[in-house]
Amino acid sequence: PGAGKSTTAAAFAQQGHALISDDLVCIHIDSAGKPWLVPAFPQLKLWETAVDGLQVTKTRLTPVREGVRKYAWSESMAFADSRVPLSQIFILQPPGSGKREPQPLALSQVP
């Protein structure tokens, strides 16, 4: 939490890149052993600070729930509608975590 996954995804979407998922994604291994990403529900959830930083008009967004300054964004962005081949996995670390170099995944974390 707090690493900026959704904000990064929204920034890519603003540049016209298709999104696969926000936060979680299903990995399907086909009969040939090739991994594929299965698109999730076509929506991003952004904290108000991210919305402001990305200069997204709040009138285009829906509050996630009352009393929470988080918004759902699904309009005006492209989401993948079919599975996508998986070639790399990147794990974003929160700012200040001290982890700046790529780290190998522990065997228990490998999909």
Image (cartoon, grey):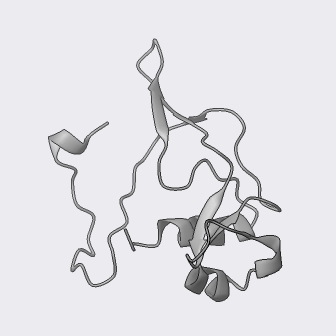
Q: Quadrant of residue 64?
A: bottom right
Q: Does residue 68 appear to the left or right of 76 in the view shown?
A: left
Give the quarter of the image for residue 77: bottom right
Q: Which residue corresponds to the image point at 64% horizontal and 44% vertical from the top-left?
A: 41
- Vertical placement of 77 versus 105: above or below? below
Q: Position of residue 7 (x, y in %)?
A: 56, 72
| Residue 103 screen position, x and y as percent | 22, 60
Q: Position of residue 27 (x, y in %)?
A: 45, 33
Instruction: Please indicate whether residue 18 sits to the left or right of residue 89 in the image.
Output: right
Q: Quadrant of the C terminus?
A: top left
For the image, the number of numbered tags is 0
- Extreme residue in the top direction: 31
Q: Which one is nearer the viewer's eye here, 65 or 95? A: 65
Of residues 99 and 63, the one nearer the viewer is 63
Which residue is at the front of the view, 109 or 34? Answer: 109
- Tell me where residue 33 appears, x and y as whole percent: 40, 19
In the picture provided, is 79 more to the left or to the right than 75? left
> Farthest residue toward the front?
66
Residue at 76%, 63% in the rendered image: 16
**Residue shown at 46% from the left, 73% from the top:** 4
Q: Quadrant of the N terminus?
A: bottom left
Residue 43 figure quarter: bottom right
Residue depicted at 64% across the width and 72% down the height = 11
